[in-house]
Amino acid sequence: YEEDDDDYSDEEDDDMSDDDDDSWKVRRSAIRALAAVVESSKNDPSKLWIDEYAWRKNKSKKMTVAGALVNRTKEREENCRVDIIDCFTRLLAVTIQAAEEGVVVLASSEAMDTSLGSSPALVIDLNAKYAPAIVKACEKQLGAKKGGERTKSSAMALLSTLSRSPNGVGGATQITSVFTHMKPILSKGADGAQHRKLVSAGSKSLKLDALRLVRTMIASESEHDPVDLKNALLETLLTELCASVQEDWYKIIAEALRVLAEVPPLLAKAWGSADDKSGQKAEMDKVASSLYASIEPRLAAHDLDQEIKECALKATAALLSVLHSSLSSEQSGRLLSLLLERLTNETTRIAAIKTLSSVVSTGSDAQMDEGGDLDLSPILADAVSELSSLLRQQSRGVKQSALESLDIVVRCSGGDALDAALYDSVLKELGAIILDADLHISHLSLCAAISVLKACPSCGESVKANVLPAALNLSTSPLLQDQALDSLLRLFKEIVVTDAVDFAELRTSLESRLSSEDEKTGPHGKQSIGNLGKSIAVITASTSSSNRDAVVKDILATLESKGKKTQEVQLALLISGDLGRLVNLSDMEGVASRLQTIYLASFDSPSEEVKHAAAYALGRSAVGSMQTFLPAILDALEQNNEKKQYLLLSALRELIHCHRLDGSGDIGPSVPLILPHLFTHSTDK
């Protein structure tokens, strides 16, 4: 696409005086009507980019709606000009949305024949035909001596939208050119003084729009080459961005800090993709020094807007996570001490918790390699102590954020860096909030307890004293499910693996829950016994083979003897099924055949709970011993009556369900054997 100056000449209106010329009102009405067309075509805007129409004066000359809008940005009346740019911005936005939904394809002409193949979606060559003209038109408005602020603001909004499209605003030349046009808007020097003469009193809102555009371009690094972005930013705009943090208006300060927070990840990605890494250390040191000088005063100040404080913490997280190796020990220590100070402040507590989590998790990955991990030892113990004390807060949001951060800190930076006494205090706080009244908080608490146990296996006694009682109470809660249940099972497994509690003692404690709870609240429900069975099965699968054999022996004794309580039989069946999912029961001599006989015989039990527990156990056992149990299920489906067929289909459902959840069992070869039975019984009445 190339603009044609002759198609939209305003010479025909030159003989009119400005007082008599009302033609701009007609043009403005026309563009508003066109904006309505764009809005009505948002589900498929391809016709506005592809279909060509004849325009005034030269009827043989045809142009698309998109092309005409770009060309008409030279409109002399600002009201019309702003509406034209806003209309095209909306058209571009709905087109990008349509591309994300697969309605159209935004691709270069080179990619049409290769990557797209026979795609049914319409192809719009935005990069080759329109992007250069859009950038050129916007730069013309940004550099115009008589251009109004509204026009410049609309032009920057259009460039921001273009940045989200494939290939963004273009290559290195276009990126540098856009940043160059932003420089006088953001600058306080001579360039800035010249710009303020062109617009009214150095508009704050225009500077805010410029910062938003820069942040959008940096954040959309997947659409631009990060090396081009990095080079253009450091050469053209970094000084002005750092200076913007010293502005007076809080919105500009906050936005400038958001932009600075995007710089370290951009550098990491740019240098990560570069083959020649010479000069990396010097550049990193220079950038880190500039960012520190801009961020530290805002992080240290107290009498600032809340938005500035939160943005300063975000920028600090990016600086420490990526460029910690380029900071001196004094600089890193200063930022960490300020972070700890913000953690103890009620107004910045949540933001500081998130910052600490980000610094610990990404800093331990050592993104820039050369400097190694970030040394958190100056604040680590105090931070963990503060986080654990926050667990006593009434605010659920504070507790949730503190638990998530505590888990990350202990998992990434715990171990020998913290002493046993501190871990003990943390475990006391965790045990106090493991309740079925709030399962999500319980889930997070259990995850943190697991991280503590992994980081410090010697804390087993503290886990036994502070966390285990609450975990045992939770194990028989009828409300326990989903994430909380999974976390509880992982805790029990970790307790057995680390020998925090003797296996026999833990098993006895779990089994005693069946009888002790009966005395208080009556018979257990299906959900409670099921969770108890899963817990015992998990610790049995995690223990030694001798302990496992003893458990299986007791299960068989319970199931083969008569006179046992219904709940005891039900629990034994559920344990055997969940254990069969985790280990191959056919590896134990004679166990699989005996259990198979017991399961099928239990279908004749007068208790409905026992019948369904047997069906559950049969299906779950088939997961770990497919060759043993699946043929028995399929054979029994052909021989038994409808009531037993229902139980057998329930067992088959458990097998398929477990395979769907985690791919347990190689069910593929058995599908041709299973499907005929499912088709046959799908027509049962």
Image: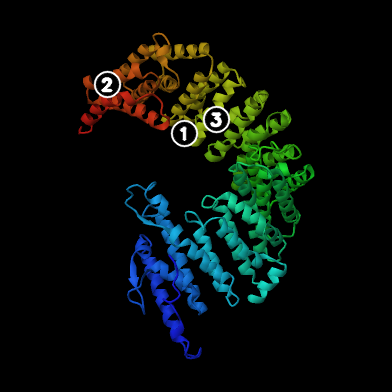
Residue located beneath label 1 in the image: 478
Give neighbour class at mark 1: few <14, some 14-19, many 20+ (Cα, 10 Å).
some
- 268 relative to 577, above or below: below
Give the foreground label among 3 and 2. 2
Q: Secondary structure at mark 2?
A: helix
Residue 473, label in figure? 3
Kind of residue sitting beneath label 2: Leu
Give neighbour class at mark 3: few <14, some 14-19, many 20+ (Cα, 10 Å).
some
- 14 relative to 180, above or below: below
Q: Secondary structure at mark 3?
A: helix
- In the rendered structure, the answer to whether residue 479 lies left or right of residue 40 reads right
| Residue closest to the eye, 449 or 53 | 53
Q: Residue at x 59, y 28 (%)?
A: 469
Give neighbour class at mark 2: few <14, some 14-19, many 20+ (Cα, 10 Å).
some
Residue located beneath label 2 in the image: 634
Return the disc, 1 or 2, that comes first in the chain's sequence: 1
Q: Quadrant of residue 593?
A: top left
| Residue closest to the eye, 167 or 41 | 167
Q: Split into 4 quadrants, where in the image is the N terminus?
A: bottom left
